[in-house]
């Protein structure tokens, strides 16, 4: 296999990892209306938890499982005070939470090496195997995790529970009047989204093989937000395609830098292209490239059949 194909496989792995992160944010923002600007915090918890356990000799299945529950637990604890705030204040608090957590990992060397970072064993330890084969195995692991997360997300949003969280997003007061515990539903969705971010973080750390606090800058959160806004909030397939687009530009810019001579740095060109696209989408198609997916619960299907008969 040629070097460009290795670049393509590498990009595909990153697409899968960030697609999981985009789906997790879509559950919180797209379907529930929670402006979580601290997404990187739960991604970071999953990455560090998995890395520490891997260095202790635990198998990767145990690492990713514990990382998922750890990120979900941290998300639940963080949601208790944060979800009492509304809109802009929630965004500010979650953003601050992500930075506080990053500085804890940065300054407390006993946790995971502080600014020196931590080397992470790969989930695959097969000797004598070509790098292309290793990357194909990585690709299989990542996309199996993405398929599971996508399936769970679809089952949640296409259920009576999903109708409730959409109702909360549209009008909290109306949902409360109908007897729904709005805070409970928000906390549950925040926890689920954080757990999925933990899965993504675990996959990321074992793939890149090294993490440090500088890996988890706030720009990572904004990158995921770009995926959701471009793809279409409240459409899980749309945000996955948004992840494909953003990561194709991100990784493609690194390839272009080695092969093309451009008047503008490809990395800067990528930022400009994404910025222009977001402005155009917000102006002319605020729902994103794909509209919100319709609810597909059995109750609605039965109701639509009776409506057609009548």
Image (tube, grey):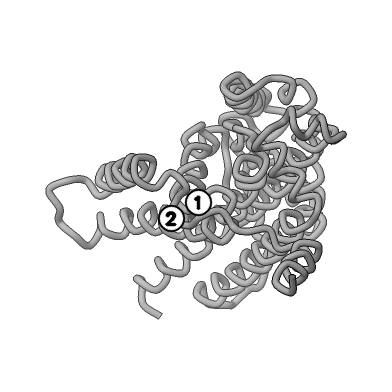
Badge 2 vs badge 1, beta-carbon distance below 8 Å: yes
Q: Which of marks 2 and 1 is nearer the N terminus?
A: 1
The residue at which mark 1 appears reads as: 232
Residue at screen point 36% across, 77% down: 2
Could you say which is closer to the camera, residue 53 or residue 254? Answer: 254
**What percent of the width, then of the height, locates residue 285?**
39, 47
- Residue 237 visible in the displayed image: yes
Could you say which is closer to the camera, residue 200 or residue 4? Answer: 200
**Image position of 104 with respect to 72: above or below:** above
**Image position of 71 with respect to 309: above or below:** above
Classify the position of the N terminus by image quarter: bottom left
- Residue 103 visible in the displayed image: no
**Image position of 114 with respect to 146: above or below:** above
**What percent of the width, then of the height, locates residue 199?**
70, 52
Of helix, strand and loop, which one carries label 2?
A: loop
Label 2, label 1: how far apart the Cα atoms are: 6 Å
**Image position of 81 with respect to 139: above or below:** above
Residue at screen point 54% across, 70% down: 135
Left or right of 74 on screen, residue 4: left
Could you say which is closer to the camera, residue 102 or residue 58? Answer: 102
**What percent of the width, then of the height, locates residue 272?**
27, 42
Q: Name the residue furthest bottom.
A: 1
| Image mark for residue 289 | 2
């Amino acid at each position: 296999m040629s070097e460009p194909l290795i670049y393509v496989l590498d990009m595909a792995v990153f697409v899968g990892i960030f697609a999981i992160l985009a789906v997790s944010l879509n559950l919180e923002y797209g379907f529930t209306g929670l402006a979580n600007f601290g997404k990187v915090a739960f991604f970071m918890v999953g990455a560090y938890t998995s890395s520490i356990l891997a260095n202790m000799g635990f198998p990767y299945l145990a690492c990713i499982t514990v990382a998922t529950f750890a990120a979900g637990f941290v998300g639940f604890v963080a949601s208790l005070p944060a979800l009492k705030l509304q809109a802009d204040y929630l965004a500010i608090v979650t953003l601050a939470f992500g930075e506080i957590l990053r500085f804890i990992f940065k300054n407390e060397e006993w946790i995971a090496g502080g600014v020196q970072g931590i080397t992470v064993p790969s989930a695959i330890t097969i000797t004598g195997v070509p790098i292309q084969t290793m990357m194909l195995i990585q690709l299989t692991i990542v996309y199996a995790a993405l398929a599971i997360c996508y399936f769970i997300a679809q089952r949640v949003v296409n259920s009576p529970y999903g109708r409730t969280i959409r109702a909360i997003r549209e009008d909290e007061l109306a949902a409360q009047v109908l007897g729904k515990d709005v805070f409970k539903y928000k906390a549950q969705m925040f926890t689920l989204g954080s757990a999925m971010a933990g899965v993504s973080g675990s996959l990321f750390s074992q793939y890149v093989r090294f993490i440090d606090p500088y890996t988890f800058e706030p720009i990572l959160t904004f990158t995921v937000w770009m995926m959701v806004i471009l793809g279409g909030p409240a459409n899980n397939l749309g945000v996955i395609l948004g992840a494909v687009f953003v990561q194709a530009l991100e990784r493609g810019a690194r390839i272009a830098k080695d092969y093309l001579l451009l008047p503008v740095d490809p990395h800067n060109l990528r930022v400009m292209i994404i910025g222009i696209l977001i402005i155009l989408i917000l102006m002319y198609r605020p729902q994103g490239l794909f509209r919100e997916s319709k609810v597909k619960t059995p109750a609605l299907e039965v109701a639509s059949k009776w409506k057609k008969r009548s």
